Amino acid sequence: MPLDKWSAVDDYINASVVRPDEALEAALRATAEAGMPPIAVSAAQGKLLAILARMIGATRVLEIGTLGAYSTIWLARALPAASAGGKLISLEIDPKHADVARKNLVNAGVDATAEVRVGPALETLPALQSEGPFDMTFIDADKVNIPAYFDWAVKLGRPGSIIVVDNVVRDGKLIDESTTDPNVEGVRRLHEALSSDGRVTATTIQTVGSKGYDGFTVALVNPAGNPAG
């Protein structure tokens, strides 16, 4: 089906199941007005992240890649209040993006739960070792470093925690063995590593919708010494 049909189905799902939300819409508007790219997850994908967090009873969530905090808001709302131990740490490399994100978090009323930290993730991740373990990690950052981000997500997680990696199919380019695109190379290296990584049980799901043709990887951190397929 063409993209316009996929988008129309997304619109139907958003209106009937996800339902409009002013704070989330405002976050998207603020992100666009700041000149940031329209690459946040879709509304349906955001709600899926929130459902996953609630399914596992997450209290601590790590997000790698904040942008305008659209997905951050979805995830933060799925957590207990900060007074009850809910905490989300989102890592963002761009200080301007972080400023927009923080304002969006305040507007959505989740700034007590969600915190944005600025800097290259591979430099800020090691400092989180004393703040875990995290029940869930959402990775939506540059694809070149995806394998390294995933490795940190496992280290900072716990048995039973989940990891979600966005944008891993890339319009089907995932299967292009001859690619020289560093983003595609990054997601291919992730899948090659997952094929023999006994620390996790993982799968990748293809998706279509208003964001085009892509997909996401979901991984479950296995109990130590008890790897699964």
Image (cartoon, grey):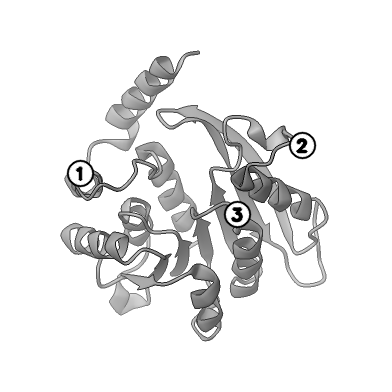
Among the two numbered marks 3 and 2 on one chain, the one whose residue lies closer to the N terminus: 3
Q: Are marks 3 and 2 in contact (CB under 8 Å)?
A: no
| Residue for badge 2 | 177
Q: CA gap, disc 3 to disc 1?
A: 28 Å
Point out which mark residue 138 bears: none
The three-letter code of the residue at mark 1 reads: Arg
Q: CA gap, disc 3 to disc 2?
A: 16 Å
Q: Where is residue 89, by image quadrant?
A: bottom left
**Residue 208 appears left or right of 199:** left
The three-letter code of the residue at mark 2 reads: Glu
Among the two numbered marks 3 and 1 on one chain, the one whose residue lies closer to the N terminus: 1
Farthest residue, direction front: 180
**Residue at (24%, 65%) from the top-left corner?**
99
Q: Where is residue 201, by image quadrant?
A: bottom right
The three-letter code of the residue at mark 3 reads: Val
Where residue 78 appears, x then y in whole percent?
A: 37, 58
Q: Nearer the viewer, residue 83 or 163?
A: 163
Q: Secondary structure at mark 3?
A: loop
| Residue for badge 1 | 29
| Residue for badge 3 | 144
Q: Secondary structure at mark 2?
A: loop
Q: Nearer the viewer, residue 17 or 88?
A: 88
Q: Is residue 64 above or below residue 35?
A: below
**Residue 179 appears left or right of 5:** right
Q: Secondary structure at mark 1?
A: helix
Where residue 126 appears, x then y in whole percent?
A: 56, 80
Among the two numbered marks 2 and 1 on one chain, the one whose residue lies closer to the N terminus: 1
